[in-house]
Image (tube, rainbow, N blue to C red):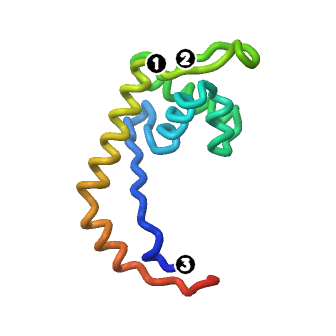
Amino acid sequence: MSSHTQPPRLRLRIVFGDIGMMGPGKADLLEGIDRTGSIAAAGREMKMSYKRAWSLIEALNAMFRAPLVESARGGPGVGGAHLTDLGREVLRHYRTFEAQAQSAGAAEILALQHMIRDIPEGK
């Protein structure tokens, strides 16, 4: 497939010094939790272990002034997880920033894309 047939993607990570970082993987995980009501289910959707998903949520919860995700232990119908108001706000700000950066950099991304060498099929 030619390099020109797949649109380039912008993947931004915001590094807050030693405190931590917010990037597309964590944003995707937050969206998955919001959609599924479960850290485990969101992790499965991303082909991520529960341990890894929980580790990312712990990092996010420790990074911000209040938790982004709250969870309750238990089996089906008892446990679950949900985004807090702050979690939804953080996710909204990150996705807005991502869209603004994509829009602002569109011409430069296109220029770079035109400079990429085509790779012959099958290689």
Q: Position of residue 49 (x, y in %)?
A: 70, 38
The mark found on residue 70 in the picture is 2
Q: Position of residue 114 (x, y in %)?
A: 34, 78
Can you identify the residue that label 3 sits on? 1
N-term mark: 1 or 3? 3
Can you identify the residue that label 1 sits on? 84
Q: Position of residue 112 (x, y in %)?
A: 33, 72
Label 3 SS:
loop
Hey, what amino acid is under mark 3? Answer: Met
Q: Marks 2 and 1: in contact by CB < 8 Å?
A: yes
Instruction: Identify the image quadrant of residue 88.
Output: top left
N-term mark: 1 or 2? 2
Q: Which residue is rendered at x = 27% and y = 55% of the image? A: 103
- Cα separation, mark 2 vs mark 3, equals 43 Å
Q: Is residue 123 above or below residue 75?
A: below
Quarter of the image with the C terminus in it: bottom right
- Cα separation, mark 1 vs mark 3, equals 42 Å
